[in-house]
Image (cartoon, coloured by chain):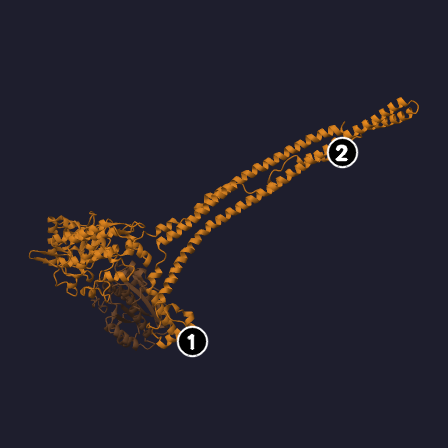
Chain colours: A brown, B orange
Amino acid sequence: MTEQIPFAAVEFAANPEPRCACVLLLDTSASMSGARISELQEGLAVLKAELAQDLLARKRVELAIVTFGGSVRMLSEFTTVDQFEPPILHADGLTPLGAAVTVGLELVRTRKRVYRQNGIACYRPWVFLLTDGEPSDPWQPAAAAVRHAETARETAFFAVGVGEANLDVLGQLSVRQPLMLRGLQFRQMFQWLSTSLKSVSHSGVSDELALKNPTAPDGWAKL
Amino acid sequence: MTVYSADGKAVDLGPVLGRGGEGVVHVRVGRDAQACKIYQRPPTDARTAKLTWMVQRLQQHPDLAQWCTWPQELLFDEERRCVGFVMERLEQPRPIHEVYQPEQRKTVLPAAGWDFLVRVATNCARMFETLHKYDVIVGDVNERNIFVDSDATVHLVDCDSFQIQDGDQFFGTGVGVVDYTPPELQGKDFRLVPRTVEHDRFGLAVIAFKLLLMGRHPFSGGSTGDLHQAIAKKEWDYPQLAQRLRHLLPWSVISQPLRAAFASAFTEEERPSAHVWVERLADFEASLQPCRREPLHKIPAGLGNCPWCTIEQVAGYAYFSRPQTQWLSQWQSPDGLLAPLDAELAALPSARQPEEWQSPQGMEAAIATARALLQAERPPDLVGWYLALGGGLVAVGGVSMALFQPARGVLVAAAGVLALVAARWLTARRQVPWHRVSEEINGKINEMREIEAEWKGEALRFRDQDRRLRAWLADLRGQVLAIGGQRQREIDKLEGSQVSQGLRAGLVRFDLVSATIPHVPVEKKRALAIRGVLTAADLDRTQLAAIPGLADVQIDALIAWRHSMEAQLTGARAHGPNAAQLSAIDGNFQQMRENLLAEMRGGLGTLRDSGQLADARMAELVEHGRQAGLALQTRVEAVRRTFIED
């Protein structure tokens, strides 16, 4: 496909800024219903608001949202922050976490290919997984894919557990230390995510960033 | 918090203008042209010394503050520790990335052409030239600390991070942004490496490049898309990239001296000085002139085709266009245009039914009188009768006399015959005019019937003509109203065709078999291919659901994959008809509407004229009938006197 004439040219002519793709893989299984899903919904609004305040990040960070509750759904395609509208989340069904991770990795890979076809510089894409349960599908192939993507420095994969999330599984999925959300501090978590994405999209540094430690006593996460 | 100037006077801090990584910038109350930067943590001794040096330096060289918010005086807390400084307050702080990014520039500076961007680049070069003249190195060149005014002048902020060398004194920068860092510094620790003028010159070249080449970073092609690696490996490939990507400005449009300057700045370690940039950019700006079609399209003199027009045609993106609200506002609602015509129509008398016209007076009465005359008993012709009787007797007498007196008898008989003949003649003489008179009167009656028929015919004709004209006007009015909808449909069609054609053409390129789609193994893809599902364009949830052996999760994955492919085409989707296409549509429909309105104005004129014509014609007929009635009455009276009453 690399030989083809890129089609998305207009988007990149209008805005040729380097891009930082970020996929949020959000657990919307039945166990997320109630306070969790409404806090998560609020958190998405916070993420948009925080990122939109940054004049450069709003042109550089591209968000996509994939939910997994019953089935894997792409609720929001890659779009720069200035055009991003948080989708409405509904909690229902089982937890096809493995499929979601595979979809997420494929999405950032494809998106990066589009950037390259259009001669757009990019930062390492982020895949940010949030779950409160146990995968209901085989997740081992996804774990292998995450390891491969991390080793090849293709993608930065972050996993965050909520409530009764299986940290063992998350630990095997993610190369990085998975984190547990303190209570329902989704807002704080998305604030941290936006700050991190902002610094990624400004630094131009492709190596590891000195991200603010979310497990500090005032942070939103615990190990 | 209260802060004090060097002479111990309290300085009022106003509202916050901005927050940075290390401090907050406030309005200085009472001095509108000034702002105060207050550090969040007290500056180190080295930083304080640097600021002190800078404030002193400004006394000697006031032009240092011409291009940047150079520290003008220090600010202290109660214990005389430096907490910040006073600087110039920028009127319209617009970061340079909002100026070189095409889409944002079109909004914030809609009237800016390419020459404006070249001028901004020249001013950036002048700014570096001035600072370098005093051995000041910017160090942390980036798109967030250069601000552009609407007159293309530029200002640097964050001057406290400049690198300054003065004899033994050295004040470093310590920070930097990869995008503007030259190859030889990539990956180095900015806190440890002193910056040189050459490093600044790389940053300046990148800024100038972005301004001239529509926000593109010169190294954004690269092999991996990673700017750090691309710059370190000097993978500067814009000229090749511009050949492959149709939405990029061809490299040859840039003047040769500028191309050489860019190439040298990006690949060599001895780079063109700020002064060289000033000269070459100014020369280039002077060579620019508008293209024939769009005044904002500035092109070097002597260039045949306008590259900006070409990009609009082949890539569908307008790098320069005035805000679209301009063409939108040109389309006015038809109400305002129709109102005067409606009023004109309402002012005309409404269509008249035949019975509403005044009919000819006196005709029926005259006809009745004439009929009565014709049927009246005429008195007998006594004179003729007596004469004939007398003549007959005389003739008979004459004949009998002739038996006795032949000569006298013949004479008497002849006289009698003569009297008979005279009687006959007299009778005949009185009968002929009556026939003539009744013929004449019948003729006059018929004439009046004709006038009556003509009046009726004309009344009907005028009513029908009036109806036809009004129906025609109503039809034209309907057409005028319908044009708004036609215009919208035309725009929708253009959008729709671009969307669906664009989307479909794009999706067709994503081959299902070669794609990695979770849950959909190769065998499944082959099975789909047999059913004609070959590319992303063929994926439709309803159709997939009808295919046996396809699990829900597989359908979801296929649709998700299609969506992700669509997402890549959003650029095509977001791009509707451009302003030129829209104003062409509007132009067409405006012309059409103008024609219809002109026709309506003509129709109203005809309606008014035909009404006046009808009035005149009907009045003429009424008068005609009245005169005819009067004439008949007079004649009938005369005949009655002649034939009946004597």
Q: Dot 2 corresponds to which residue?
A: B376
Q: Is residue B451 above or below residue B593?
A: above
Q: Secondary structure at mark 1?
A: loop
Quadrant in which the C terminus of chain B is drawn: top right
Q: Dot 1 corresponds to which residue?
A: B548
- Within the image, what quadrant is residue B390 found in? top right
Crowding around mark 1 (Cα neighbors within 10 Å: few <14, some 14 to 19, many 20+) is few
Q: Where's residue B340, x and y in %?
A: 46, 43
Q: Secondary structure at mark 2?
A: loop
* Front position in the image: B563 or B16: B563
Q: Do marks 2 and 1 both belong to one polypeptide chain? A: yes
Q: Where's residue B530, x and y in %?
A: 40, 74
Q: Amino acid at mark 2?
A: Ala
- Within the image, what quadrant is residue B211 found in? bottom left
- Within the image, what quadrant is residue B512 found in? bottom left
Q: Where's residue B254, x and y in %?
A: 23, 55
Q: Where's residue B434, x and y in %?
A: 74, 32
Q: CA distance from mark 2 to mark 1?
A: 108 Å
Look at 37% across and 53% down and name the residue there: B582
* Front position in the image: B59 or B269: B269
Q: Chain of mark 1?
A: B
Can residue A197 be seen in the rendering of this structure?
A: yes
* Front position in the image: B142 or B85: B142
Q: Quick check: B274 left or right of B352?
A: left
Can residue A28 be seen in the rendering of this structure?
A: no
Marked residue nearer the N-terminal end (2 or 1): 2
Foreground: disc 2 or disc 1: 2
Q: Which mark is residue B333?
A: none
Quadrant in which the N terminus of chain B is drawn: bottom left
Q: Amino acid at mark 1?
A: Pro
Q: Chain of mark 2?
A: B
* Residue at the limit of the structure toward the front, as seen here: B407
